[in-house]
Amino acid sequence: MPTSIKEAIARWQEKNPEEKADSAKKVSLIGQLPPIEKMDATLNTLVACEHLSLSSNAIEKIGSLGGLKNLKILTLSRNNIKSMAGLEAVGDTLEQLWFSYNNVEKLRGIATLKKLKILYFTNNKVTDWSEFMKLAELVSLEELNFLGNPLQERLGEGEGSEWREQVMQRLPKLKKLDGVPIVKTGGDEDE
C-alpha cells in the first residue's frame, strides 16, 4: 500500500512539531516508505508552501497543485513521471523546477511556467530539438541543467561542445547551462 499525501504530511508534522503544515513555507515529503504514488487533493492544504519537495517517490502524474498559490520551488526528481501536464496550476508562481530522473520525452505544457528561472531536467528522455525548443517560450529561464537526455548525450558536453554551442544559439538569455556559467564575449575571450 503506497503512502498517501495525508500520511506523508502527518509524518512531516511529527518531525516538525514547531510548525503547522498549512502555514509552513517549506515542506519536504522526500523518499517516503512505502513511496507516494499519487499527488492528491491533500496537497491543497499546504496553502503557505513556497518550496515543496516530493522527490524520490513513485509518482506517475503531476496533479492537485491548484491550492499552492505561493509555490516557488517544486522538486519532483526521481519519480516515474512521463508528462509535464498538471504544472499549469502553478504557472504564475513557480520559479524553480527540479525534475531530473523522470521519464519525460515531451515538454508540452512547460510554457505555462511564466516565471520559471531554474530548470533541472537531467536524465529524462528528450531526444529532439523540436521538443527542446519549447524551452524558448520560458522567457525568465536563466539556468538549465539538461545532462543525460538523449539529445544532449548525442552532442557531447563541456566547453566548446556542439551541445553547448547549439543551446547558446537557441536560448540566448541563459546564464548557466549544465552547471557552468555562460560567458558572453563580444570579442577576444582572453579579455
Image (cartoon, rainbow, N blue to C red):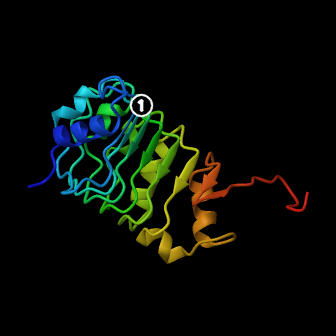
Q: Is disc 1 surrounded by few (<14), some (14 to 19) or many (20+) residues within 10 Å?
A: many
Q: Quadrant of residue 102?
A: bottom left
Q: Quadrant of residue 9?
A: top left
Report the quarter where the N terminus lies: bottom left
Residue 18, x across and y down, in percent: 37, 27
- The residue drawn where x is 34% and y is 32% is 90
Above or below: residue 156 compared with residue 52: below
Q: Nearer the viewer, residue 41 or 26?
A: 26
Q: Nearer the viewer, residue 184 or 40?
A: 40
Residue 19, x across and y down, in percent: 36, 27
Query: How many numbered callouts?
Result: 1
- The residue drawn where x is 56% and y is 75% is 156
Residue 34, x across and y down, in percent: 18, 57
Report the quarter where the C terminus lies: bottom right
**Residue at mark 1:** 50
Question: Residue 31 vs residue 74: left or right?
Answer: left
Farthest right residue in view = 191
Residue 3, x across and y down, in percent: 16, 49
- The residue drawn where x is 62% and y is 57% is 168
- The residue drawn where x is 33% and y is 31% is 17
Farthest left residue in view = 1
Helix, strand or loop at mark 1: loop
> Which residue type does callout 1 highlight?
Glu
Above or below: residue 109 compared with residue 33: above
